[in-house]
Image: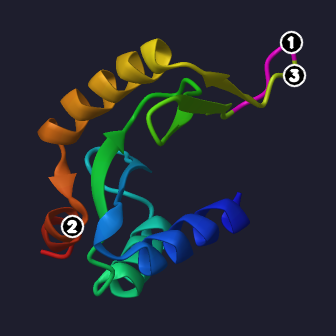
Amino acid sequence: MAAYYETVLQWAREAGESASVRRIIGVPEHDGVPPPAYLAWLREHQAEVRDVYTYEARVMSWNSSCAWHNTALIDDSVTFLSFSGAGRQQLTGFSIEGPVCLAYFASTFDRAWGALQTLDEYVARQSR
């Protein structure tokens, strides 16, 4: 998974103004506080992407014990879903091609995006 995110960052660095990456980072919290190691990683990531203008990250506080999915929306037609936690089917991820599916997940992503703190705001709030 680390190689995937490094590839995404490299693509954002090289894309110029022709494209962008928006990422929602789920942060596990207990009583509103992330684990120290996770906060340290967020600070490192913040420094790593500070000058990558085609990359934006927002933070979703995560305090649920249930597994969730990651979504990648690529171009105008490919949706890739990957899952945390293995179920009985041992399904780890798959892609769906088609604009209807992508439009649904893009709408869901946009609603979440608008409600979340930027990475900079989240790190600043946790550093107080």
Query: Is residue 100 placed above or below 94 in the rendered structure?
Result: above
Give the magenta part as a residue range.
Answer: 85-89
Q: Main secondary structure of the magenta part?
A: loop
Q: Residues within 10 Å of mark 2 (few under 14, many from 20)?
A: few
The answer to whether the residues at label 3 and label 1 have Cβ atoms under 8 Å apart is yes
Q: Residues within 10 Å of mark 3 (few under 14, many from 20)?
A: few
Q: Which residue is mark 3?
A: 90
Instruction: State the SS at label 2.
Output: helix
**Residue drawn 39% across and 70% down?**
39
**Left or right for 125, reference 78:** left
Instruction: State the SS at label 1.
Output: loop
Query: Is residue 58 placed above or below 121 in the rendered structure?
Result: above
Q: Which residue is mark 2?
A: 126
Query: Is residue 74 placed above or below 22 in the rendered structure?
Result: above
Separation of marks 1 and 2 at Cα, in angstroms: 37 Å
State the colouring used for the structure image. Answer: rainbow
Separation of marks 3 and 1 at Cα, in angstroms: 5 Å
Amino acid type at image mark 3: Gln
Separation of marks 2 and 3 at Cα, in angstroms: 36 Å
The x, y position of residue 65, in whole percent, is 52, 28
Decide if residue 17 is in sight here. yes
Q: Is residue 43 magenta?
A: no
Q: Which residue is mark 1?
A: 88
Amino acid type at image mark 1: Arg
**Residue drawn 47% across and 42% down?**
75
Instruction: State the SS at label 3.
Output: loop
The x, y position of residue 30, in whole percent, is 37, 45
Q: Quadrant of the C terminus?
A: bottom left
Amino acid type at image mark 2: Gln
Q: Which quarter of the picture shows residue 16?
A: bottom left
